Amino acid sequence: MAPLSVFRVALLVSFSVFLTVVLGFGLPALLNAVMRMLGLPETSVTECIVVLYVGFVLYVATPRIPRGAVEVKGKAVFITGCDSGFGNALAKHLHKLGFTVFAGCFLRDEGGEGAKELEEFHSDRMKVVQLDVCNEEQVNKAVEFIKDNLEDSERGLWAVVNNAGVSTFGEVEFTSMATYKQVSEVNLWGTIRVTKAVLPLIRRAKGRVVNVASMYGRMGNAMRSPYCVSKYGVEAFSDCLRYEMKTWGVKVSIIEPGNFIVATGIMTRDVVATTANKLWSEAPSDVKEDYGKSHFEQHMALMRSYCSSGQKDMAPVLDDITDAVTSKRPYTRYNPMEPHWWIRVQVMTHLPGALSDLLYF
């Protein structure tokens, strides 16, 4: 979004100073009091600060600890949304690692460029299938194709990566119910539909379900309610599925990317302009009158600025999905995002809402 106002910057800096003072003086005093209660030697303020600082540095700076890797040979992965972005790049990456990849492409039957790129591999381990995750028939056909083309059907399908998704924006009163339904149909119901269809194959392999959500599955934001609603749903579905699949030895992981709009091209200035015109033209007259054109244009300008922000390299997301697929002990959640977004997610999910609202809105 646009840069924070001077007031908000000052507020964030003040909050950081406040936390530093609390941690630097209050926490050591509390620890010393606990030590006295337990009859143990008191820890000095300096030692407490050093230990906390070292712990923080180790947590933030230490590379991911290796947790063992599974044998790739003979394993197959089904990826949705492979026409472009994360899905297309992931299909190429996992194929390079030795997996058999079933790449679901929305535009495969229409000669889409992404599908053509993958088909040009001319590899027995790269199989491109037509897939609209909103179409039950296409999902079932894709699963039947996978069953017929698995190297060893008894071993099942090692992993499904539910990556297909759409993004949109708009204030609540400017956004139609049709838009809410459309976004959730792809992002949430598409994920559920595909997962349910392949789950018997995944259970047979004691494999992996990897669902691509978003940082907006953990926190809300102005202008993004349709997208947030769908991604919150993906998070909840994934958590419930993880509890249920534990008995079967199936691991369920959630990927929560930050801002990769530039890297994926999922939202451009042209898309913002087209969406803005549609939002304004379809809005009720009383909503237009109450909000005013200037208010609307100001928020559209924020969205345009958002299009040129964020990370340009998809590698962090690809690395995390790969870890979720290949690690013997994958994480429940992965957070490939810039540090300031990671801090914001922690603030908005762990601190009182009144405080996070004051800092960011």
Image (cartoon, rainbow, N blue to C red):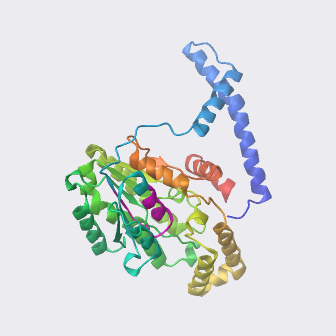
Nearer to us in this view, 269 or 96:
96
| Residue 197 image position (x, y, % from top left) | 27, 63
- The spot of residue 354 in percent (x, y) is 63, 52
Q: How many marks?
A: 0
Residue 202 vs residue 155, the one in the foreground? 155
Q: Quadrant of the N terminus?
A: bottom right
Question: What residue do we see at 44% from left, 52% from top?
Answer: 254
Residue at 26% in and 67% down: 145
Residue 263 horizontal/vertical position (percent): 58, 63
Of 68 and 193, the residue lying toward us: 68
Residue projecting furthest to the left: 154
Res. 256 visible in picture? no
User: From the viewer's perspective, is residue 250 above or below residue 216?
Assistant: above
Q: Residue furthest front?
A: 122
Task: Assign the C terminus to one quadrant of the image.
Answer: bottom right
Residue 161 lies, in percent from the top left, at 39, 58
Q: Is residue 35 above or below residue 60?
A: above
Residue drawn at (69%, 69%), measured in percent from left and top?
305
Answer whether residue 88 is magenta in the image.
Answer: yes
Which portion, as a residue range, is magenta? 77-93
The reply to whether the magenta stretch includes residue 53 is: no
- Residue drawn 42% across and 72% down? 115
Q: Is residue 125 left or right of residue 44?
A: left
Residue 65 appears in view: yes
Q: From the viewer's perspective, tell me whether residue 278 is left or right of residue 289.
A: left
